Image: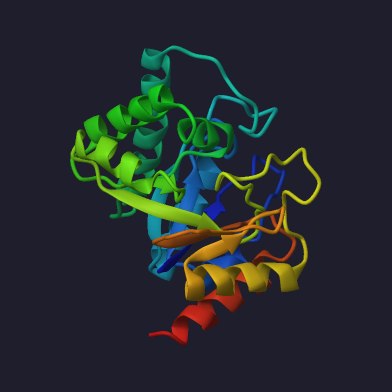
Amino acid sequence: MKINCDMGESFGPWVKGNDVEVMPYIDQANIACGFHASDPLTMLSTVNLAVNGGVEIGAHPGYPDLLGFGRRDYHCSREELIATLLYQIGALDAICKSKSSRIQYVKPHGALYNKMMVSDDSLRAVMTAVASYEVGLPLVVMSTNRNDEVQALADQYDLPLIFEAFVDRAYDDDGLLVNRRHEGAVHDNLGRIELQVAEIVNDQAVTTLSGKKIPLRADTLCIHGDNPHSVEIARYIYELLDSYR
């Protein structure tokens, strides 16, 4: 199991996240592509951090919503969504190539990520964009009770999937993330986060906000770089997973 983190989400002089401190403890850096956050210089500096740290680079595209940080739903046509994704993936990949690197997977951000997990039309559009950009480029999707169904859909596009679980977000009884507007949706208690990590790793399950325990099989664990405990979380998960190696 790997550790991934959303990164490169600063914008101009506005700094978001603890990228430098977190990078040594992760395997995969999901780098914002300029539509929900970031800018060309931030993308370049974050790519440099990842390359120097030997960390895999993933494109982290979102809706064109800088003001809302990509966390608001955005209604667009299938063609517009595909073009929006290709534009962002290509921009980050160009920067990677300038540093003799490349993107190694795609993980959509925020509202787009959540939308594709409940709308097959959105999911198909995302899969079409990623598969048409590069054959064999993996797509990160949320691990839910629909894993087999989503995998069958991806197989139609010859698209590899990486199933992801979240350590600092609460789950509902359907296995989806609790909306950030609801109290308790984001874990800001380090002890609670550590319990959720251990449960996912050891039991392949997670306890929902209501107290129900549901199965959860994942290939990678996500932390959010802007969580105030991001460095401690990353270090804890790194040490926990290292104990299994």
Please give left or right for residue 29 compared with residue 126 in the image. Answer: right
**Tag count:** 0
User: Which colour assignment does the render follow?
Assistant: rainbow
The C terminus lies in quadrant: bottom left
Can you say whether 203 is above or below 106 in the image?
below
Give x and y (percent) for residue 237. 55, 74
Looking at the image, which is closer to me, 110 or 207?
207
> Compared with residue 202, is residue 69 higher up or lower down, i.e. above or below?
above
Residue occupying the far front of the picture: 212
* Residue at the far right in the pictured view: 183
Compared across the picture, whether 86 is left or right of 174 comes to left
- Residue 98 is at least partly visible in this image: no
Q: Is residue 10 left or right of residue 218?
A: right
Q: Residue at x 35, y 53 (%)?
A: 162
Q: Is residue 72 rendered to the left or right of residue 5?
A: right
- Please name the residue shown 21% across and 34% down the image: 157
Residue 170 appears in the picture as rendered: yes
Q: Quadrant of residue 35?
A: top right
User: Residue 130: x and y, percent?
Assistant: 30, 35
Residue 214 vs residue 95, the one in the foreground:
214
The image quadrant of residue 83 is top left
The residue drawn where x is 24% and y is 41% is 159
Residue 196 image point, x, y percent? 62, 67
Q: Nearer the viewer, residue 217 or 31?
A: 217
Looking at the rendering, in which quadrant would you find the N terminus? Answer: bottom left
What residue lies at 62% left-to-right and 56% top-to-bottom? 225
Residue 57 horizontal/vertical position (percent):
39, 54
